[in-house]
Each structure stands twice: as C-alpha cells, then as structure tokens.
Amino acid sequence: MRILPAVAGCVTAAGLALAGCSAGAVPASQLPHTVLLAYDGRPAAELVVTSGADSITIGTGTRGGPLVRAHTPPHSGVRPVLRTGRDRHVVWVGLDHTGLRGPADLRISLSPSVRWRIVLAAGAPILRLDLADARLSWLDIKAGFSTITARLPDPSGQVTATVSGGASSIGVTIPAAVPARLTLAGGAGSATLAGRSYTGIAGGTVLTTPGWPSSTNRYQFDLIAGVSSISVRARTAT
C-alpha cells in the first residue's frame, strides 16, 4: 500500500512526490490539504476518524480511484493526515493544525470497490454520511455529533450501525424494502421508522419494521446514548 503523501512527506493532490519535503522542512501552512491512499485491490478495510472538526463528510469516490482521499479547504486551519496499521487493514484519518483560520471541514472519499467498516472516534457539530454507493459492513459512531445525516447502501447480510456518543438529531435513509430494527437503549424524544412516528420513547425500546426477523439483508441501529430525534426512512430508487 502507498500513502500519498506519507505522514512525514509531501505530495501534490495528484500524488506526485516533492523531493526533500517533510513536515519538519515545510511550514504547516504550505503542506497539502489533499492526501490520497492508493487502492491495492483489497476487498475490505476499516476507516477510523481520529480528529474532531467543524464538519465531517464521508462519501464514495470512483471505481479505479484511491482507496481513501481526505481533503480540507485550501485555507483551512487543519490539514488531513493518513496512516495505516502494521497489517495495513486499518486506515486512520486525523488532522494537523496549519496555523490558518479557515474552516475545519473534513471530507473523505472511500473506494466503492471495498467493503468498509467505519469508525467515528472524534466528533463534530455536523456529520454527513453519503454512502448510498458504498459497500458497508459496520458503522460505529463513538463520538458525539449535533446533527447526523446518512444515506446508507443496500446491505449485504446484517449491517449494524451503533451510535454511542449521543446526538441531537439523526436522519437516516435506506433503500426501499430493506428491513430495519431500531434499539433505543438511551431513549429518544421522538422517532420515525417505516412511516410511523413515536414520541417520549423510554430507554430500552425496540422498534422493528415488518420482515426484519426473516430477512438476511437488513439494518440494525443501536443507539446507546439518548437522542432528541431520529428518523429512519425508505429511500426511493432514482
């Protein structure tokens, strides 16, 4: 696997190395705001976001493109940094300060050819998950977010999405006819599932759409912390 750039090096957004460039040799404000991780044909990988931001957006790239692309605006106060574990299965995305004053808006694009496990270990006011074209095996939102919006793909088997960090508002769409079960361990002010709305929901409540017990391809949503509102709605095909 090739990281473009490496944590201690610099490349252009196109992935061209700059000779003699290192984090110690170049001011942080001049380091690139786009980093890429080359796709190596792997079938599965895990993404872990380790730094908080003003907003975090995760979507899909193009087939044949990078495994991971992380980007912040050119004048952002932060820039993305990628690293991998020894087995190269896990990709960590963090942020370094640049000394600039622009917004800390982090955008991540994932290869649609890979089945992803996604972990959000750091929070933000806004989380956007535009994953309708992704391949998803697990979603684990450990950190707190004010607003979460998610477009999730067709599941292959059971896909579990866990929210343990708390949120004010969560809005999820899933493909039409895909069953879902919603476990509200911490309760909720309001919830909508399969067109039915509920209010004043006690902790431990479980809501289920028809067909969930007998379906192989389905979603399980586990909300560990309490939320103000959550909706899980069917998305019509376009």
Image (spheres, helix red, strand yellow):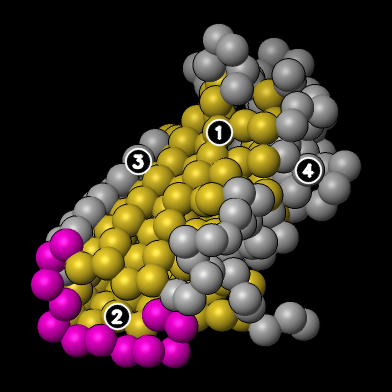
Find disc 1 in the rendering and name its residue: 46
Find disc 3 in the rendering and name its residue: 121
Q: CA distance from mark 1 to mark 2?
A: 30 Å
In which quadrant of the rendered view does residue 222 lie? bottom left
Find disc 4 in the rendering and name its residue: 113
Q: Residue furthest front?
A: 214
The three-letter code of the residue at mark 3 reads Ala
Q: Is residue 176 visible?
A: yes
Q: Give the residue at x 31% y 45%.
A: 142
Find disc 2 in the rendering and name its residue: 191
How many C-alpha atoms fall within 10 Å of the one at disc 3: few (<14), some, or many (≥20)? Answer: some
Mark 3 and mark 1 in contact (Cβ < 8 Å)? no
Range of the magenta residues?
A: 193-204
Which image quadrant: the C terminus?
Answer: bottom right
Q: CA distance from mark 4 to mark 3?
A: 24 Å
Mark 4 secondary-structure assignment? loop
